[in-house]
Structure formats: structure tokens, C-alpha cells
Image (cartoon, grey):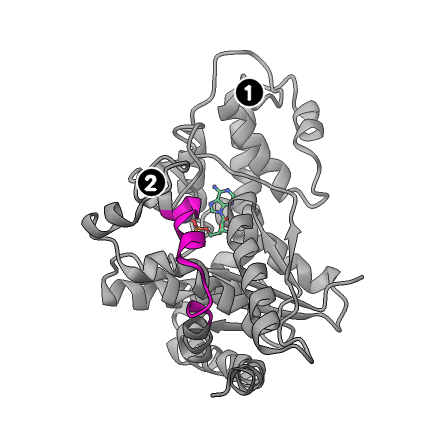
Amino acid sequence: PRPQTIFSGIQPTGTPHLGNYLGALQSWVQSQLTQSSSTSLYYCIVDLHAITMPQHPAALMQSRREMMASLLAMGLGPERCVIYEQSRVPEHTELAWILNTIAPVGYLNRMTQWKSKLNLDPNEINVTEVADTAGLNLGLFSYPVLQAADILLHKATHVPVGEDQLQHLELARHLARTFNKRFSKKSRVFPEPQPMLTPTKRVMSLRDPTKKMSKSDPNPASRILVTDEPAEIQNKIARAVTDSTLGITYDPTNRPGLATLITIHAGLTARSDSPESVAKEYEHMGHREYKAVIADCVAEYFKGFRGEYERLMKEPKVLEEISRKGAEKARITAQETMQKVKTAVGL
Ligand code: ADP
Ligand code: NA
């Protein structure tokens, strides 16, 4: 059966890097073409999730604008998708509170992302004491509940996720089941959302192929932003870590640095070729020459994007208006759901 409602979110981290793009945003853009018009698409900038980590208010404000402009410049259409910022739709937090009241603390304690924040062995069970002393906030602990609320608020049937998020989606399914069983025996309020496993394109750091490309990496040369100028792209790719073996082969185990570059190249070719077949095409090329090919490919791919992004960033009022209208649309389904939820609970 074809998806009926797809929901996905991204934190307002400024302009996306190639990992964000190939791991998530590219499939958002493609969903507009591949999903039937009867499927609803919700794409949310999850700023309430972002504040579970310390943020500078002015920087957060700027990052929210940059992410919104990026999504639009990539070609997400506000006519086709509901694109909005989470904090403009108060029903997210309203539903999160209600779900908090049925979310088992023990279940949340076992979340690997929470545990990794505590720097604990995921098999360690009794983490409550440590959490108290680590100065971590309650919002970070209940982050997966807010995420469940995001998904269930629009009765999403399908959620594009990477492997690392499957555990959080499982919690959303658990909370949907628990809520339905306890409060809505006659007519189910929530469908159980299904994971939509997108072909994983994990992009690694250009400077250390054992780490993923990330916004939080202190070395800006480790990532390419989709807004980077051609000269910056060239420079970063030229300095990317590879190896001393001659020729081009796709071998993530033995040639991880080169594999990262091939993954990027394959991900941005129009035909979406496999990394293996892209490598085959360039097998006799030298590293320096092949790096120049990839740099051109990246610069070319995001050429139109950069112009549109800059245009949008000069029009804060337009951005504000698009964001406001997106939230208005999102609130329609959000309020419908909250009405049913409150009635079911007796509120
Ligand atoms: P970051 O690690 O830069 O902070 P986020 O955690 O905000 O990025 O991730 C936003 C989205 O981008 C998520 O869907 C995540 O799975 C995806 N993503 C982030 N980094 C990568 C990467 N290096 N490779 C593939 N996908 C990634
Ligand atoms: Na991250």
C-alpha cells in the first residue's frame, strides 16, 4: 500500500552539509515526485528539539532562517508539502505532555542516544543517578517523546529514518499502541507509523573517514556545506584524506577516504548510479584528477541552489510569511488530532 502521510524533521543547524543532504533532504525533495498526490508530506524544522542542547538565541534565530531558506532553495514546494517550524505549532508540545504521562521512564532510560549523552555503556541499566549528577536536562531525556508527538500529531503512516532513529520510531509505535489501548478502544486515534528505510547513504568526514560528516565537528574542512562556493568545495575535496593506492575503486573497508568521495559523487549523479559503477567508470584516473571531477560535480549540482538560497536570505519577510503559512496548514491537522486526543483522555 502506498504511504498516506509522511512526516520527517530536521534540526535548525544552519545550512545543511552533504551528509544531511544525501542522508535525508535529497529524499524529501524526491518524495514530491515519487509519492502520489494523495500522500500528505510534512517536513518540520524541529527547533524545540534543538533547545535541548544549549543555544545562543540570536544564532538559533539565524539558523532557523538558514534552514528554512535551504529547504525552499532545494526545491521543496510549500504548495506540495507542509514545511514549517515546530515551535509555531503549540500542539506539538501539548501532545508531548500527554504522551509523557504514558511514557515509561524505564523505556526512556534504555534509549541509546540518551545513554551516549551520559557516556555510558548501553547495557548499563541504572542510569538515573548518573543523570542527576551530569547536569543533563529533562527535555533531553524526554526528547524521544516529543519526537513521537511530532509523528503522531499528523497521524503519520510513514517516517523516513536512518538506522540510528529506529529505536525512537519504535517508541512512537509503542506510545500509539498504549494510547489506543487505554483511551480509544472504539476508534483508534493513532495509526502505528511505519519506518521508511531510505537507501542509507552515510557520508563520512572528509578529514577522518571513521567519523560521520557532522555539523558538530570542530574542523570545518571535514564537511561541505550545500552553500559552499566552488573554490571552497575544490579546496576541501583536494585536501580530503585518501590513500596511496593507484586508481579508483570503491572499497569502504580498505579505502574509506576514497569511498566517501565516491559516495558523494554517486549520490549527486543524475542517474543515481551505484558507487561501484561510478568507481568503475573512473578506475584508471589519478586521485588528484578524480577529486577535481567530484569538486566540479558538487559545485555544478548546487549551483542553482546557491543563487536561490541567497535570494531568499535577502527576503526575511518572504521567509517569515512562508513559515507562518506552513504552520497555519500544519495546525489544521494538529488541532483535529488534539481534539480527538483530549476527548479520549477526558480533557
Ligand atoms: P549533524 O550530525 O550534522 O548534527 P543531524 O543529527 O542534525 O546532523 O542530522 C540531520 C539529518 O541528517 C538526519 O536525518 C541524519 O540522519 C542526517 N545525517 C546527518 N549526518 C549525516 C551523515 N554524515 N551521513 C548521512 N546522513 C546524515
Ligand atoms: Na547529530
Which three-letter amino acid code belongs to the residue tagged 2? Asp
* Residue at the far top in the pictured view: 245
* Residue drawn at x 50%, y 62% as measured from the top left: 9
> Where, by quadrant of the figure, is residue 100 drawn?
bottom left
Is 107 magenta? The answer is: yes
Of residue 316 and residue 11, the one placed in the foreground of this image is 11
Sort mark 2 into few (<14), some (14-19) or many (20+) by Cα contacts within 10 Å: few
Image quarter of the N terminus: bottom right
Q: Is residue 11 left or right of residue 83?
A: left
Are the residues at dot 1 and dot 2 in contact (C-beta closer than 8 Å)? Answer: no
- Residue 11 visible in rendering: no
Q: Mark 2 — residue?
A: 217
Magenta-colored span: 99-114
- Three-letter amino acid code at disc 1? Thr
Q: Report the residue marked by disc 1.
A: 253
Tell whether position 310 is magenta.
no
